Image: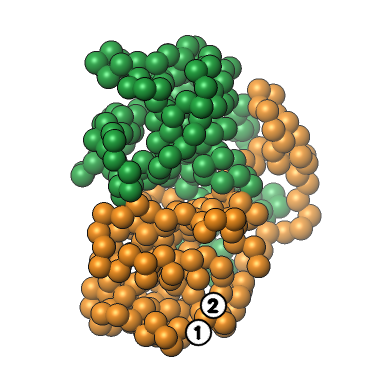
Chain colours: A orange, B green
Amino acid sequence: MQNPRNYRFSRLVPEGDNRERHVCGDCGWIHYVNPKIVVGAVVTQGEQILLCRRAIEPRQSFWTIPAGFMEERETSEAGAMREVKEEACADIHINALLAVYNIPRISQVQLIYRATLASPDYSAGPESLEVKLFNWDDIPWDDLAFPSVHWALQHHRSVIGRDGFPAFSNPPGEFGNY
Amino acid sequence: MQNPRNYRFSRLVPEGDNRERHVCGDCGWIHYVNPKIVVGAVVTQGEQILLCRRAIEPRQSFWTIPAGFMEERETSEAGAMREVKEEACADIHINALLAVYNIPRISQVQLIYRATLASPDYSAGPESLEVKLFNWDDIPWDDLAFPSVHWALQHHRSVIGRDGFPAFSNPPGEFGNY
């Protein structure tokens, strides 16, 4: 679902503010735009990692960890569980905050948790073409959807067997651009 | 700055979506509302903690750590540094992610960093009545602006001298309601 193209917003600095906002020329509505939060999880069963092949754009048919936009009135942990349920029809146990990634180009903050499958059941939800458990060496590295999927998988691997680790952030100098 | 009260949005489930969104009755614009990110920092100089007395609502005249809404196209660390600069006119060095707090009632995620003053200079910015360094025992506990300020101060204290700690989340059973 797209927004219509004929809306009449202008960029103005509202009174009492210090930066330009989207202001509707019809009614004066100020459309505050803030960064959006993506919540997701690296989900494992034993040594295998759960990945979803995307049924939707962007990056349709590429592989990703289950993740998506956080919704109102949920916690980030509940959001990550919801996304895994929607995309991979799976229930999980979250055991740590793995990473906080920033993609400033698209004003996105990703909160990625470390989790395990709560039961062996999983299947493709409406936004996935397929869902599969991968051994590390079988991960389709060249067909991953986003740079942050690479980061999350590598960061996850670096703390296997460890608890009480600090959450990772972006690899040095990387901001999620291709 | 407030938005006008006479806009004509309805709650509808857009085609292809699975939950109600705000849709404008005039032009069809879908106003997606997602949780907002607050970025801030517990800032210390030696053993003292920097607090700001709020010049604006909500909780005007109560004390808070410097924090505010993350803006577009900045990283969360840059946002926390900007907020400290705006509210306390101070430059900081961030050394850890202290906490990720969820306030689902108001759809807010707070990313709170641990930082030190980069120089001894600080003063009240336009959103602060005063800015002050407090010894722990002098913190105005009964006049703190938000529950999450209590959480951040207590969590900060529990990891003094420690590096490589996992980011805190809400205290068990607490969701930021008064």
Question: In the picture, which quadrant includes the N terminus of chain B?
Answer: top right
Q: Place residue B145 in its image quadrant.
A: top left
Vertical comparison of A43 with A164: above or below: below
CA separation, marks 1 and 2?
A: 6 Å
Report x, y in % for residue B165: 30, 47
Say which of B41 and B32 sits in front.
Answer: B41
Which three-letter amino acid code belongs to the residue tagged 2?
Leu
Taking B34 as reference, is B98 left or right?
A: left
Asked if badge 1 and badge 2 are on a common chain, one would say yes
Q: Name the residue under label 2.
A: A144
Disc 1 designates what residue? A140
Q: Do the residues labelled 1 and 2 touch (CB within 8 Å)?
A: yes
Residue, x 72% and y 59% (percent of image)?
A4
The structure residue drawn at horizontal position 50% and vertical position 84%, both measured from the top left corner, is A140
The residue that appears at 76% across and 34% down in the rendered structure is: A12
Residue nearest the viewer, comparing B9 with A126: A126
Q: Residue B43 location, x and y as percent?
A: 42, 28
Picture coordinates of residue B75, whole percent (x, y): 56, 46
